[in-house]
Image (spheres, rainbow, N blue to C red):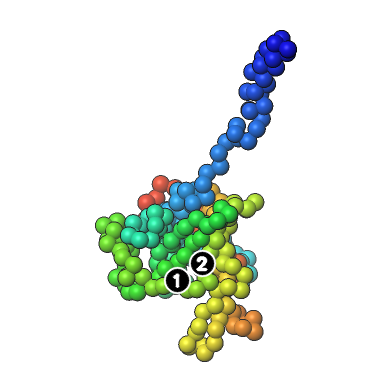
Amino acid sequence: MRRLRICLFVLGSFLGPVLGAAGPMAQPARADLLDELSDTLPGFWENRTQWEDAGRPGATDQTRHVLMNADIAPAAVPGLGDAVFYLQQIQDDFAPHVYRQGLLVLTSEPGGAVRMSIRAFADENLWLDAHLDPARLSTLREADLLPADPGCDLFWRRAEAGLVAETAPDACRIDSARLGTTLRRMERWTLDGNRLTQYDRVERPDGTVVHESPAGRPFVLDRWPGLPSGGVPR
């Protein structure tokens, strides 16, 4: 019996590391999704390649796109968590204007998804180009923000296409005083390395489209490596 115990001990000592190496503990740890987004989202993004391709001979309404950029910079706002980012997007369709401006507030959800709320500013002009002055961002407070539109948060998850964020189906509804009706909105972002895509669509209850990304195709924004947030590519 003693000889059997010794043999089993020796066998276990030999097989233990082998089996352990093949088990789950030996697999490389996958980065936390919130941490990955916090590391990857900040920077200067622009669809210059998409815009230039749309201007080449042979371009049609189905391929034409306006110029769009996105500045995303970390912002420390008390009470909003550790993953908060300033967002400013400029759209240039012969008259450059602010397409969107606000804060991206990211929080982990049960099951591994990450919720992204987009909070607009109560006074947009006050925070124009705030990403160029980190000291200004440090003065942001909850009172400077409007509430997030109910049901319009995006949820990030991992997919074959990289990281994907979408609004929940048929959840984002916005009351339009101008149109006198409640509009449905859907939005989708994808993030794959140095490429960020954005698509959004707003429609009436009967399905009539009120607003949509040009030609029904997403903006395809590339990261400009080494370019500080707020820079302009040449």
Type of amino acid at the residue the image marks with label 1: Ala
Whether residues under marks 2 and 1 lie with C-beta atoms below 8 angstroms apart, the answer is yes
Q: Would residue 66 be seen by someone viewing this image from the given angle? A: yes
Query: Who is closer to the viewer here, 62 or 56?
Result: 62
* Residue 197, image x, y percentages: 55, 60
Identify the disc placed on residue 162.
Answer: none
Q: Quadrant of the N terminus?
A: top right
Query: Who is closer to the viewer here, 38 or 209?
Result: 38
Query: Looking at the image, is 127 positioned above or below residue 210?
Result: above
Q: Assess disc 1: are there few (<14), some (14-19) or many (≥20) residues with their C-alpha within 10 Å of its C-alpha.
A: few
Query: Looking at the image, is 29 positioned above or below residue 60?
Result: above
Query: Who is closer to the viewer here, 164 or 96?
Result: 164
Cα gap from disc 2 to disc 1, whole angstroms: 8 Å
Q: Would residue 50 be seen by someone viewing this image from the given angle? A: no
Asked whether, in this view, residue 49 is left or right of residue 21, the answer is left
Q: Please name the residue shown 33% across and 64% down the image.
A: 129
The quarter of the displayed image where residue 146 is located: bottom left
* Residue 30, image x, y percentages: 56, 42
Dot 2 corresponds to which residue? Answer: 153
Type of amino acid at the residue the image marks with label 2: Asp
Helix, strand or loop status at disc 2 = loop
Asked whether, in this view, residue 155 is left or right of residue 142, the answer is right
Dot 1 corresponds to which residue? Answer: 148
Q: Please name the residue shown 51% across and 47% down the image.
A: 32
In the displayed image of the protein, which residue is found farthest to the bottom?
180
* Residue 183, image x, y percentages: 55, 81
The quarter of the displayed image where residue 200 is located: bottom right
Q: Quadrant of the C terminus?
A: bottom left
